[in-house]
Image: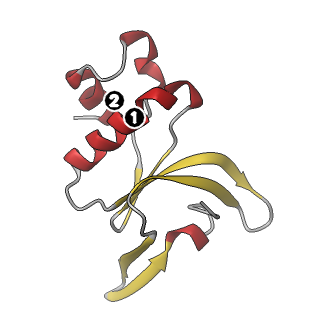
Amino acid sequence: MRFRDQIRSIGAVPEPLLHLVPNRFEVVGDVVVIAIPPRLETYKQVIVETITRMRKNIRTVLNKVAMLEGEARLGDYEILSGNDTITPHREYGHLYLQETVAVPGYCNGV
């Protein structure tokens, strides 16, 4: 079931605003990155709870608050849930601890 459909099924966001709910989010290890529009400010906590209910391994949820900018293509994010932005990342059989706030395209300061 798509994320927006999950939100619809629990009746967490009024129908007129439902089209603003992101239909997907990125998962980096045990960190979720989602872009919640400002008009859904009131519903952030319900969105976070739905994500953590869907994905039991998630420890931190980040909200993308600014577009990627600059030569390094870094954006700004706010922590909605959790407090640890360091996550394990496995690639080509190697396990890394990755600081998501320093990865271009994910986070830059919280």
Q: Is residue 51 visible?
A: yes
Mark linked to residue 67? none
- In this rendering, the answer to whether 42 lies above or below 28 is above
- Residue that numbered label 1 is attached to: 23
Where residue 23 sits, quadrant-wise, is top left
Q: Could you say where residue 107 lies in the image, as x and y percent from the top left?
A: 58, 62
Tag 2's secondary structure? helix
Residue 15 lies left or right of residue 36; in this view the side is left
Where residue 14 sits, quadrant-wise, is top left
Residue 76 lies left or right of residue 14; in this view the side is right
Give, as a three-letter code, the residue at label 2.
Answer: Arg
In what quadrant of the picture does the C terminus appear?
Answer: bottom right
Q: Residue furthest right?
A: 71
Label pair 2/1, CB-CB below 8 angstroms: yes
Label 2 and label 1: CA atoms lie apart by 5 Å
- How many numbered discs? 2
Give, as a three-letter code, the residue at label 1.
Answer: Asn
Query: Are there few (<14), some (14-19), or many (20+) residues within 10 Å of tag 2?
Result: some
Q: Is residue 103 visible?
A: no
Mark linked to residue 4? 2
